[in-house]
Amino acid sequence: MGTREESGLTTADKFESWVKPLLVPATRYAYSILMSREDAEDAVQEAAIKAFVSLGRFDPTRSFKGWWFTIIRNCCLDGTRKRKLGSGVDLTHGETAFHVTTDPRPQIARKDALVQSLCRLNSDHQEIIRLRYFGDCSYQEIADSLGIPIGTVMSRIHAARLALAKEYKEVEK
């Protein structure tokens, strides 16, 4: 896999150029499923290895991001099957190094309510929200990842947003 192609780049170099800009959204996406920073990082690393090994099966006419996020989702699902995750939320994710002068409790409560609301959605709505907002995927990348038409992606995102807003209002009561 490390052979040089006509462009002078090895397959590994090319793969790294595709994966590197996607690491942050990929980790956010995995975190949204696993709710553990360490597990998310492990899943992304495992997905990167699986994607590299399976690079010969990637269709270059399709979105690499959509293909890779499918692998990430499968790694996350495999991980959740192997271990029962607690329902706790890692509220330390995203801590800053500077002193915060405002009371963080309202922000933490909103984050917790949003996570609870997301967990109350059906699996199709959860997945579409995770790909779009945590994974930063385009409609086409979501369509490629889920193997559905782009029109279905648009209608599911719309329905998922409405359902999430409704659940959020319920949780906030």
Image (tube, rainbow, N blue to C red):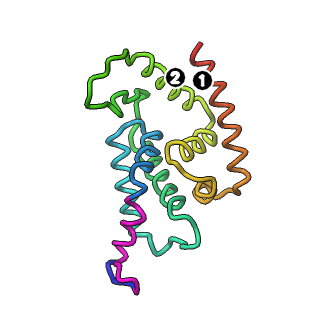
Whether 78 is drawn above or below 114: the answer is: below
Which residue lies most toward the bottom here? Answer: 6
Which secondary structure dominates the residues rendered in magenta?
Answer: helix
Q: How far apart are marks 2 and 1 (CA)?
A: 7 Å
Q: Residue at x 66, y 25 (%)?
A: 166
Q: Residue at x 49, y 55 (%)?
A: 69
Label 2 close to label 1 by CB (< 8 Å): yes
Residue position for label 2: 113
Residue position for label 1: 168
16 in the magenta segment: yes
- Residue 62 is left or right of residue 2, and the answer is right
Q: Where is residue 106 in the image (x, y as percent from the top left)?
A: 45, 16
Amino acid type, callout 2 = Ala
Pick whichever of labels 2 and 1 is earlier in the sequence: 2
Q: Give the range drawn in magenta.
A: 6-20
**Viewer-nearest residue: 122 or 48:** 48
